[in-house]
Amino acid sequence: MPDPHPHPSDPALDAAVDRLLAHAGGHLVLAAPLGLGKPHRLLNAITRRVAAEPATSLHLLTALSLTPPSAGKGLQRRFLAPFITRHFGTDFPVLDYAMAMRRDALPPNIRVEEFYVQSGALLHSGQAQRDYVSLNYTHVARSVAERGANALVQKVAREPGGLRLSLSCNPDLTFDLLDEVVRLGKPRPLLVAEVDPGLPWLDGPCTVPATFFDLVIEHPAPAPPLFALPREPVADADYAIGLYASALVRDGGTLQIGIGSLADALCHALVLRHTRNADYLAALEALSPGLARSPLVRDVGGTAPFALGLYGASEMVNDGFRALAQAGVLKRRVLDDVGAMARINRGQATAHDVERLARDGRWLDGAFYLGSTALYDWLRRMPPEQARGIGMTRVSHINQLYGGDEALEREQRRDARFFNTCMMMTALGAAVSDALEDGRVVSGVGGQYNFVAMAHALHDGRSALMLRARRGQGRRATANVRWNYGHVTIPRHLRDIAITEYGIADLRGRSDRDCMVAMAALAHADDQAALLDAARAAGKLERGFTAPDAWRQNTTGSLADRLAPLRRSGVLPDYPMGSDFTAEEERIVAALGWLRARTGTFAGRVATVIAALAGEQARDEAALARMGLQAPRGPGERLEARLLRHALARTRLQPARPGRD
């Protein structure tokens, strides 16, 4: 793994690597947190040293090794390259091992095992695919302890004006790992912390004395920026799914959400429900007339503003929770006192209970956080009295009921709704979330199975799996509602609620026949006949069944028509969580998305090029300058400029969304 760029020596890092290798006898079995909690500079110093010394070895046990996106080529590169530099900075320490793994270029003495990976990033890496470990999030600590981890490295925050340290973004596995080490009677690993002055200080269960770690590294030089996820535009399908999901949330309940544009859409819909209820009800009616008055919404959720509010209990804290807190939706508080929680839930709270709830109650518990710069700024600037309402804690507390205080957690997690994303679902209710049928891993199981199982274990809990009905555009579009698929993440006996842009299917306790019909109603109109034929052939559906006429409206164009007024009015904005792009860049994002949707096939590419070359086009100097095409040279750049101007003209008055059927 040769290093293409020289790196100045850092005495603090060099000394830490010396100590780690000496402690491990030259053979490190190293645990590192997922996501933001990795100390990139220290990990790079370790991997460079081991790569240069073949007599040593590194076995890294981790997950979600975050790297900035590749700029790609063509118009995509013209857009992304400047944005990546601006957003991530020129000094962001990209993880050497992660980039080497993408190229299958890890040396023989370095091995990396991950239980969760950046979505789709490692599909073509043999090293990553071979060393992926399929685990529930709650089983990771046990597995790492059993593998004999002899060291752990972690990024931390230092208490302002104090000596304590906060695991801040990642208390998820560290405490659980040390408990498992003790349980198994194994030696305690060497614990090394790297202080990041940019990491938000959070108090509570994630704080430790400085002596908790065997070695604490502090750098004199300014720290590089925290890894921040660029905020994405939300398409029509995502908004439809988010609106449907929002009506299943009960006031006074508990909320868990995943990551991505579907979660952003759901949180925006919940904010609308609370702050602009008339607009929210109009959006539901436009999407699905009568939905707000349906038995499912009446029995499971609601559409009124949140009088009691929600309590967040989610393995991941993201920008959606920031938006919910700022809008006043996250305001139901919990205490770690089963007696007090029982009295509060039954309307029998004492004056002392009410006082404690206001002073010590938490409105959000999480195991790790990851999001935009706005999320980190919000956490960093939060007044201490408000920050006390956030409890960053171990994942075993968040993702399961057993092993801690089950009675307490049942009282805290009343009316829990668990919203997670999957890639595909079968017509009989199984979900595909982490891998393809050839075995290649797309992302990982993470906590999804944990939350689905918990929804069934809680008397009033429900799990909703959200997915887009189709992947891709035009002739290359493929169905995400399948009759069957050769890989399953969530088995069909745990089926509960499924949501696509075309509706909600309540699958819990349903027969196979009724489940199949409900799922077919969520499929794109062009995919329904094949599902029904397969069901009839398997004896799961009567021969005489005829699909209702309403199912024919399950098309991208019909959905766009229903949501168009809400898009134009700003009720459903392109970037509900805020944007990391300039206004000019947002226009270009929409244009590039439009081009991508129409050039997925050879015929589409030819038609789009012909249209771009024909006729006069507005110059749009600002957009051309941003893309470096204000003075194109050669036929290739001239064609790129024509395509960009054509796409900008076509999307000038349209929000960012996929193309029609």
Image (spheres, rainbow, N blue to C red):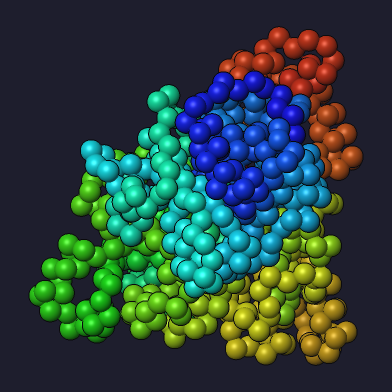
Residue 198 or residue 25, whichever sits in front: 25
369 relative to 47, above or below: below
Q: Residue 197 vs residue 159: left or right?
A: right
In the rendered image, residue 437, in percent from the top left (x then y), is placed at 81, 65
Taking the spot 11% from the left edge, 74% from the top edge, the residue there is 352
Q: Residue 441 vs residue 652: left or right?
A: right
Residue 370 at least partly seen? no
Q: How many marks?
A: 0
617 relative to 371, above or below: above
In the rendered image, residue 479, in percent from the top left (x then y), is placed at 77, 62
Q: Quadrant of residue 637?
A: top right
Taking the spot 47% from the left edge, 63% from the top edge, the residue there is 178
Residue 157 at least partly seen? yes
Residue 590 or residue 168, whichever sits in front: 168
| Quarter of the figure with the N terminus | top right
In the rendered image, residue 89, in percent from the top left (x then y), is placed at 53, 26
311 relative to 533, above or below: above
Q: Residue 25 vs residue 520: left or right?
A: left
Residue 304 or residue 52, whichever sits in front: 52
Residue 488 or residue 189, whichever sits in front: 189
Taking the spot 49% from the left edge, 73% from the top edge, the residue there is 183
Q: Quadrant of residue 503?
A: bottom right
Furthest-left residue in view? Answer: 351
30 relative to 464, above or below: above
In the rendered image, residue 249, in percent from the top left (x then y), is placed at 43, 70
Taking the spot 43% from the left edge, 24% from the top edge, the residue there is 221
